[in-house]
Image (tube, grey):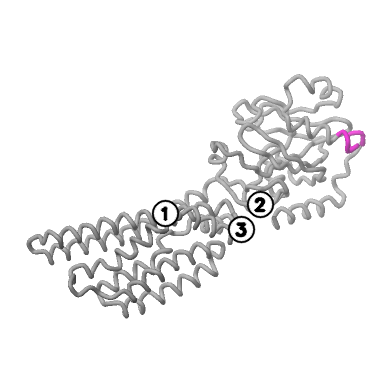
Amino acid sequence: MKNLKKQINESFFNPVLHFLPVIVFMIVEDVAGIHTAWLASLPVTFLLAVYVFFVYRRILEWFLFSTAIYLTVALFATVLPDNPSAPDFRPVRVEFILLLVFAFSLLFRTRISSFINSRNKKMLSMINNLNEMFRMIWVLAIIIFLFTHAHTIIVILKVPNMHNTLSFIYQVYVAVLMFVLFYEMIRVTIVRVRLLKEEWWPIVNEQGKTIGSIQHQTSLNSPIKYMHPIIRVMLIDNNRVYLQKRSEKDLVFPGLWDTAISNHIKVSETLEQCIQRTAEERYRLKPIKPLFLSNYVHETDFEYHYAFLFVACYTDFQEYNKALIDHAKWWTVSQIEENLEAGIFTDNFKTEFDLLKRSGLLESVQCECECSLKDLVSKGSKKINQN
């Protein structure tokens, strides 16, 4: 849970914080001038940089980009001289500079994103953060565009009581910026809380190494097929295999006979934890100490499975969870072989049955599940955690 919370926090970093230094610089410069704006914004930048470095290390490149925007705007505002012939345009000078920098960033968004990603490990969970940062650039750009152009129109038309009108527009502008700041803080907090309550699956590559994570319903509904790690435990005893008949409500292989214990590994969950959770949920088996047999990759209509296949032996089953399984029973090897092409078994099970036969374990009268298998499972759990 701790790792999941950290990953969600990283994926949903408040995008306003990226632009807090430049917002502080703009507002303070309008009120107290360039020198005070530097004094106010530099400490904010430093504190945020320290915060990101120690808490959100993976998005450091993202923050460096937003810091570059702040420094560019501040330096141009410092170097460019004021136009004494147009004093009424001075309050929007920094905003115009920022608007140009934002326009440049959006124009070259693809190249900027590629450069940032090339300097960072391409974690899929981090793509959201980059998108959120550019979304915030669009939001701020629209707000600043409306403010600067409203200010410009009023100055050009020289509307009656112009200075009071400009002051009112500026107050509205600052209020909108503050509203966006607090709105984003609340929105990100709500998203984090909601996501923590949902089930998340790791995304792995073809070597089984974790490269990201995704909410499980999002993955199943996505046009992109992600690869997720799953556990599969074949229960055997004296040339028999215990199988479950999957529920008709299942999205994948409904109503087909399948390996007894099968489940997706959740984010921050080890192989052993997933096996124990699933065995207890479906059969009230506790504890279970399976032997690792093999791993393989399988494609379904919705996703890719990176399967970790285990074998264990159990003969005494009190009951199975009828809410998750339609039926469960022992099958002899001959019964399975007679019906293997009848379309009643899942594709995963067909692959696993072949691996099981070649292992020689089926012919064993007894599977010694109480030997040093705990160490083997622990070793496998550590491996997936390291990935």
Which residue is rendered at x = 21% and y = 64% of the image?
171
* Amino acid carrying mark 3 in the image: Lys
Residue 27 occupies quadrant:
bottom left
Observer-side mark, 1 or 3, equals: 1
- Could you classify mark 3 by the number of other residues whose Cα lies within 10 Å: few (under 14), some (14-19), or many (20 or more)? few
The circle drawn on residue 121 is 3
Q: In the image, residue 69 lies at what x, y percent?
A: 41, 66
Label 2–label 3 contact, CB within 8 A: no
Mark 2 to mark 3: distance in Å? 12 Å
Q: Which residues are magenta?
A: 357-364
The residue where tag 2 is placed is: 210
Q: Is residue 331 above or below residue 72?
A: above
- Could you classify mark 2 by the number of other residues whose Cα lies within 10 Å: few (under 14), some (14-19), or many (20 or more)? many
Label 1 sits on a secondary structure element that is helix
Which residue is rendered at x = 29% and y = 73% of the image?
28
Q: Is residue 358 magenta?
A: yes
The residue where tag 1 is placed is: 107
Q: Is 361 displayed left or right of 13 in the figure?
A: right
Which residue is rendered at x = 57% and y = 45% of the image?
199
Mark found first going from the N terminus, 2 or 3: 3
Quarter of the rendering occupied by the N terminus: bottom right
Which residue is rendered at x = 39% and y = 57% of the image?
137
Mark 1 to mark 2: distance in Å? 33 Å
Label 3 sits on a secondary structure element that is loop
Is 262 or 20 nearer to us in this picture?
20
